[in-house]
Amino acid sequence: MDQPPPAAVDSLSFEAALKELEQIVGRLESGDTPLDDAIALYERGSALRAHCAARLDAAQARIESIRLGADGAPAGTTPFAAG
């Protein structure tokens, strides 16, 4: 039975992308994957890794955008504009 095509990487949540990436790593490490399939898995894994890194970078930028008041306590946030 054929599997449905994988979801577009950019539509995945961080958690879903990370889970799929872990599965891909497991399949590649098993050594049982034919070469053409391994290459396709590697390419998908590379895209998933980049997506996860971008999501983490965006989260870090949001955290860093918290403004501090004169007393050093959080005083508000600055809207994060991805781009």
Image (tube, helix red, strand yellow):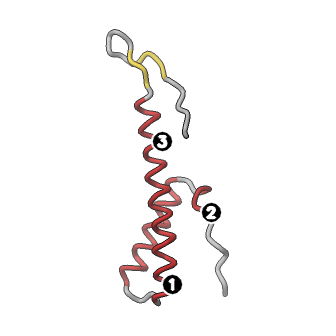
Q: Is residue 71 left or right of residue 66?
A: left
Q: Is mark 2 on a helix, strand or loop?
A: loop
> Residue at (55%, 40%) from the top-left corner?
83
Earlier residue among tags 2 and 3:
2
> Residue at (46%, 40%) from the top-left corner?
59
As drawn, the label of residue 8 is 2
How crowded pointer 3 is (Cα within 10 Å; few <14, some 14-19, many 20+) is rated as some
> Residue at (50%, 53%) from the top-left corner?
14
The residue singled out by tag 1 in the image is 37
Which amino acid type corresponds to the residue marked 1 in the rendered image?
Asp
Residue situated furthest top in the rendering: 70
Total marks in image: 3
> Residue at (67%, 87%) from the top-left corner?
1
Q: Distance between the residues labelled 1 and 3?
A: 31 Å
Q: How far apart are marks 2 and 1 (CA)?
A: 18 Å
Residue 30 percent across, percent down from the top left: 37, 83
Q: In this view, does 22 lie above or below 77?
A: below
Q: Is residue 23 above or below residue 61?
A: below
Q: Is residue 57 above or below residue 19?
A: above
As drawn, the label of residue 58 is 3
Which amino acid type corresponds to the residue marked 2 in the rendered image?
Ala
Residue situated furthest front in the rendering: 83
Q: Are marks 2 and 3 in contact (CB under 8 Å)?
A: no
Q: What element carries label 1?
A: helix
